Amino acid sequence: MQLLKTLDIMNYEEDIRIDETALDVEWLRQASLMMKYSKHLAHLLHEKDLVKVDLDLVKARLDKSIRTKPSKYGIDKITETVVTNTIITQEDYLEAQAAYMQAEYEVNIAQAAVNAFNARKTALENLVRLFGQQYFAGPTIPHNLTKEWEERTRQSNANAKVGGMKRKGQ
């Protein structure tokens, strides 16, 4: 649950959005956002490593305790399988294992965020490419030179007829 709070504080939902009307600003933000989420991932990887060390310590302590005092755990004959199976049923081990699984989950979510920012970079590249090709420009009507020429000619002829009529009638 700590991860969800962290992502909320980091404002992931807002950071991942692209304002297509300000591509220059978005490009300026991209590197710092990528660094921010990559650092977050590195921090979580470090936390996961620490939790793994704790898990290994719990396992080692239980292993030693089981081998030293098997009767405390209801064991008559010690074998590797019995020791392993006894370790994984102990409350200390289960708690440490759950903490490790949570840390691994948080790393996976943070990795997904970093991957999303890589996808954001690609999206920005493509949006800039589209912008350069005037994809976002308003619609334009191509000139129909034949039609325009005919219209001007017709207008000129109409003007000439009107001008010629005025002269005759004057």
Image (tube, helix red, strand yellow):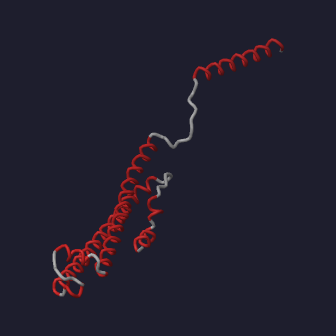
Does residue 147 appear to the left or right of 22 in the view shown?
Answer: right
Residue at the limit of the structure toward the right, as seen here: 169
From the viewer's side, name the closer residue of 60 and 52: 60
From the viewer's side, name the closer residue of 147 and 38: 38
Pinpoint residue 126: horizontal percent, then vertical percent: 41, 46
160 shown above or below 71: above
Residue positioned 44% across, 42% down in the render: 132
Does residue 112 appear to the left or right of 63 in the view shown?
Answer: right
Pinpoint residue 147: horizontal percent, then vertical percent: 62, 21
From the viewer's side, name the closer residue of 27 and 116: 116
Instruction: Please identify the quarter of the rendering in which residue 86 is found.
Output: bottom left
Pinpoint residue 137: horizontal percent, then vertical percent: 53, 42
Does residue 131 appear to the left or right of 165 in the view shown?
Answer: left
Instruction: Please identify the quarter of the rendering in which residue 139 is found.
Output: top right
Instruction: Please identify the quarter of the rendering in which residue 90 is found.
Output: bottom left
Residue positioned 29% across, 69% down in the render: 45
Does residue 78 appear to the left or right of 35 in the view shown?
Answer: left
Quarter in which the C terminus is drawn: top right
Question: How many numbered badges does the structure rendering display?
Answer: 0
Residue positioned 68% across, 18% down in the render: 154
Residue positioned 49% across, 51% down in the render: 20
Quarter in which the N terminus is drawn: bottom left
Pinpoint residue 110: horizontal percent, then vertical percent: 36, 64
